[in-house]
Image (cartoon, coloured by chain):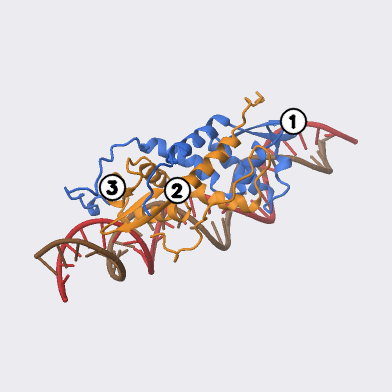
Chain colours: A orange, B blue, C brown, D red
Amino acid sequence: MSKQILPQIPAEVECCAPLTEEALDVDQAGDLARMFKALGDPVRLRLLSMITSAPDGEVCVCDLTVGFDVSGPTISHHLRVLREAGLVDSERRGTWVYYWPRPENLRQLSALLDAAAPVLAAPVPA
Amino acid sequence: MSKQILPQIPAEVECCAPLTEEALDVDQAGDLARMFKALGDPVRLRLLSMITSAPDGEVCVCDLTVGFDVSGPTISHHLRVLREAGLVDSERRGTWVYYWPRPENLRQLSALLDAAAPVLAAPVPA
DNA sequence: GGCTTGTTTCGAAAGTCATCAAGACAGGGG
DNA sequence: CCCCTGTCTTGATGACTTTCGAAACAAGCC
C-alpha cells in the first residue's frame, strides 16, 4: 500500500509560519487545504477517528466497514482520500489491510488552528 | 442502504478488535465535518489566515479582496461559507463590513486534531 | 432626490465529489 | 489448481461547488 502509482502524497509540509504572525502563502494554502478537505466529510472524519483511537495504533479495514451505511467501495474510496491527503498510511498484511495515522501531518493542522485562534479574548464588536 | 451487501463480519478473530472506542458519533462528525469542509478550499484558508492574523482582531472586506485572483462576489461567497460554518463572524459598520475569528470553534478543531495525533510511542508498522 | 462606492444575492456554466454496482486483484485453504 | 473472502478499481450518475457577470441592496455624499 501507499503505492506510488498514486501521486501527490505531501510527504510532510514545511513547517510553518504561525498563522497569527503572517498570512499563508498560496502554496502552503493549497497543501493544507487538501488535508482539511479530506477531513470535510462526515464519513472520513469518523473513519479517521476510528483509526486514531484504535488501541493498537492501527485498524484493519474489516473493522472500519461495520457501523457505516455506505458500501465497501465507498469506504475504500474515503480511505484512499485520507491516504492521499497524507493523514493516514496503510499496508496489506496477508489477507487484511491495515491503516494507521500520520501524526506529523495531523499535528501540523492542529498547530495551525491553534495559532489561528486568537490568544487574547478578541474585543469582539457587539 | 447497502446493508444487504455488507457481509457480516466472520465470528472469528484477531482481525476484529473490540471497536468500542471513543470514536466520534454521527452527529458530532456532521458538525465538525462542516467546519473542516469550510477550511478545505485554498481561498477560504487564506481568507481565514488573513482574518486571524489581523493586528486589530478583525478585517474589513475591502482589505480581503486585494491579493486574490477571484472576483468580489466569489470572496463574498467564501466569507459566507466561513461564517455559516461558525469559524468567523461579521458585522456591518457604516459603509464597510468587518470579519473576525471565532476562537472557541477554531480551538475545538485544533483540540480534535491534537487528540487524533497519537502520542508518538505508537509502534508504526514498517 | 440622484450619484458613488462597498458588499451581497441571483442565475448559470463548468468542474468536482459521493456513492453505487459490477468486476478485478490479492492471498489463503481446499 | 479453483474457490472463497477481503479489498480495491472502474464506470456511471446525481448532487454539490466554484466561479463568474449582472443585478440588487446599503450607506455616505453631492
- At label 2, the amino acid type is Arg
Residue at the (54%, 37%) spot, across then down: B84
- The residue singled out by tag 2 in the image is A102
The answer for how far apart the CA atoms under marks 2 and 3 are is 19 Å
The answer for how far apart the CA atoms under marks 2 and 1 are is 47 Å
- At label 3, the amino acid type is Asp
| Residue A65 in view (yes/no) | yes
What is the quadrant of residue D4 in the picture?
Answer: bottom left
Comparing marks 2 and 1, which lies closer to the viewer? 2
Classify residue B37 as left or right of residue A70: right
Residue B31, image x, y percentages: 45, 37
Give the answer, above or below, for where B118 lies relative to D10. Answer: above
Q: Nearer the viewer, residue B61 or A39?
A: A39
* Circle 2: element type: loop
- At label 1, the amino acid type is Gly
- Which quarter shows the C terminus of chain A? top right
Residue at the (61%, 45%) spot, across then down: A16
Determine which of the numbered discs, if any, sits on residue A63 in the image. Answer: 3
Residue A119, image x, y percentages: 61, 29
- The residue singled out by tag 1 in the image is B94
Disc 3 crowd, CA 10 A, few/some/many (<14, 14-19, 20+): some
Q: Are marks 2 and 3 in contact (CB under 8 Å)?
A: no
